[in-house]
Image (cartoon, rainbow, N blue to C red):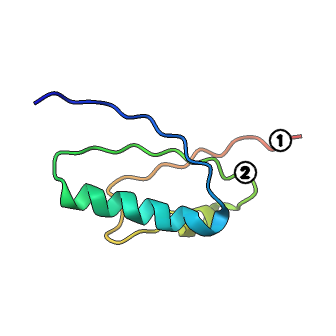
């Protein structure tokens, strides 16, 4: 089977981020063998807010947060 990489950049309102991630997680659960890597830029959120924003069911198998220096 050929593996194809699809790169997507999604510009979403804050209110739809969790819904979009849940949709992606649901697809992932229905199709074993698929692998997803998602990066999100949430510059106006605190770390606890970011953690809550990416919460999906079932939970992600891996999460990593990069805190960047404050922007000027």
Distance from the alpha carbon under mark 2 to that under mark 1: 8 Å
Seen as rendered, the residue at the extreme left is 1
Q: Nearer the viewer, residue 10 or 53?
A: 10
Q: Which residue is drawn at 33% across and 31% down?
A: 5
> For this view, does 1 lie left or right of residue 67?
left
* Mark closer to the chain start, 2 or 1: 2
- Which of the image's four quarters has the N terminus? top left
Q: How crowded is mark 1: few (under 14 residues within 10 Å), some or many (20 or more)?
A: few
Q: Which residue is drawn at 54% across and 41% down?
A: 9
Query: Which numbered disc covers residue 71?
Result: 1
Q: Which residue is drawn at 35% across and 72% down?
A: 57
Above or below, 70 relative to 54: above
Residue 59, image x, y percentages: 35, 66
Secondary element type, mark 2: loop
> For this view, does 3 lie left or right of residue 69?
left
Number of numbered discs: 2
Residue 19, image x, y percentages: 48, 68
- Which of the image's four quarters has the C terminus? top right
Residue 61, image x, y percentages: 32, 56
Q: Which of 9 and 50 is in front in this view?
A: 9
Secondary element type, mark 1: loop
Label 2: which residue? Answer: 43
Q: Which residue is drawn at 46% across and 68% down?
A: 55
Q: Residues within 10 Å of mark 2 (few under 14, many from 20)?
A: few
Seen as rendered, the residue at the extreme right is 72
> For this view, does 68 lie left or right of residue 25?
right
Tell me where residue 53 sits by quadrant.
bottom right
Q: Which of 4 and 49 is in front in this view?
A: 4
Tag 2–tag 1 contact (CB < 8 Å): yes
Q: Which of 36 and 1 is in front in this view?
A: 1
């Amino acid at each position: 089977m050929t593996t194809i990489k699809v790169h997507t950049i999604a510009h979403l309102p804050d209110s739809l981020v969790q819904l979009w991630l849940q949709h992606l997680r649901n697809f992932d659960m229905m199709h074993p063998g698929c692998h997803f890597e998602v990066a999100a830029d949430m510059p106006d959120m605190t770390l606890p807010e970011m953690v809550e924003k990416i919460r999906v069911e079932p939970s992600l198998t891996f999460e990593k947060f990069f805190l960047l220096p404050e922007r000027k």
